[in-house]
Structure formats: structure tokens, C-alpha cells
Image: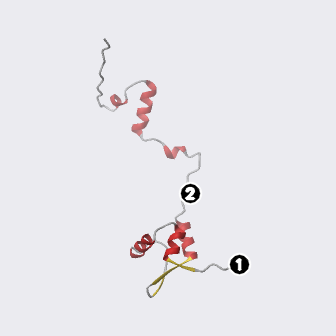
Amino acid sequence: MEKLPRVVNEKIAAKLLGLSVTTLRNWRCLRKGPPYLKFGAAVRYRLTDLKEFAMRHRVEPPFRGSHHLLRPKEKYRRVLNAESKGTDAGAQDGMETKTTARHVG
């Protein structure tokens, strides 16, 4: 079995992270992104650094029972309440709504 290299170039690093090489280059200029090694003009990334960087940016989605985190905004809630009661939500907000009657003849 062949051992994996401990360091990779920016093209492989970008591919491993699902990013473009340009993004990694921009991040280096902005002093952000994963740590890197510089050998003259050559830039290398340690695989352990790439893995740690990826894990630091891992996001845990909320569990299913966390519906309280996804409440609609107050205005939307009022519209839903008004529709269920059969009233005009705009009138509750102090906004006038125009209604037009059609004559069928």
C-alpha cells in the first residue's frame, strides 16, 4: 500500500477542500484560510492542516425538534392569523386595502 504524501500543492489542496485555487490564493493574501508552507515560490499545504481547517468550519444543523428556531417573522404570523380568521391582515397593520366589486350583468 502506498503512503499518502504529508504535503500537497495548492491545486490538490483546493480540490480536497472543494475550492478553487484562486480562492486559496486570495485567502493567503488576506491571511485567512488553512495554514500553508512556503518554500521559495512553492506553496504547500499539510494534509493535517487541511483536515483541521475543514473540521473548524463544520456546521452542525439544528436537530429536528428545533422548530422554535425557524419561527416566521411577526408580520408573516399576523397574515397567517388573519387568513385563518377571515380578516384582512393589512387592516391590522394600519394599512388600507382597496377592494373592487365586479358587477356581473
Residue at 55 percent across and 75 percent down: it is 49
Q: Position of residue 20 (x, y in %)?
A: 46, 69
Give amino acid for label 2: Glu
**Relative to 63, residue 37 above or below:** below
Q: Nearer the viewer, residue 10 or 53?
A: 10
Please provide percent x and percent y for residue 33: 46, 71
Vertical arrangement, residue 97 with respect to residue 52, above or below: above
Side of 35 relative to 101 (left or right): right
Is 95 on the left-hand or right-hand side of 60?
left
* Residue drawn at x 39%, y 73% as measured from the top left: 30
Q: In the displayed image of the protein, which residue is found farthest to the top?
A: 105
Q: Amino acid at mark 1?
A: Met
Q: Nearer the viewer, residue 100 or 62?
A: 100
Q: Is residue 44 above or below residue 73?
A: below
Residue at horizontal 52 percent and vertical 64 percent from the top: 57
* Residue on which the image places disc 1: 1
The residue identified by callout 2 is 60
Q: In which quadrant of the rendered image does the N terminus lie? A: bottom right
Q: How far is disc 1 from disc 2 in space, using C-alphas?
A: 34 Å
The spot of residue 38 in percent (x, y) is 47, 84
The 10 Å Cα crowd at callout 1, few under 14, some 14 to 19, many 20 or more, is few
In front: mark 1 or mark 2?
1
Callout 2 secondary element: loop
Q: Secondary structure at mark 1?
A: loop
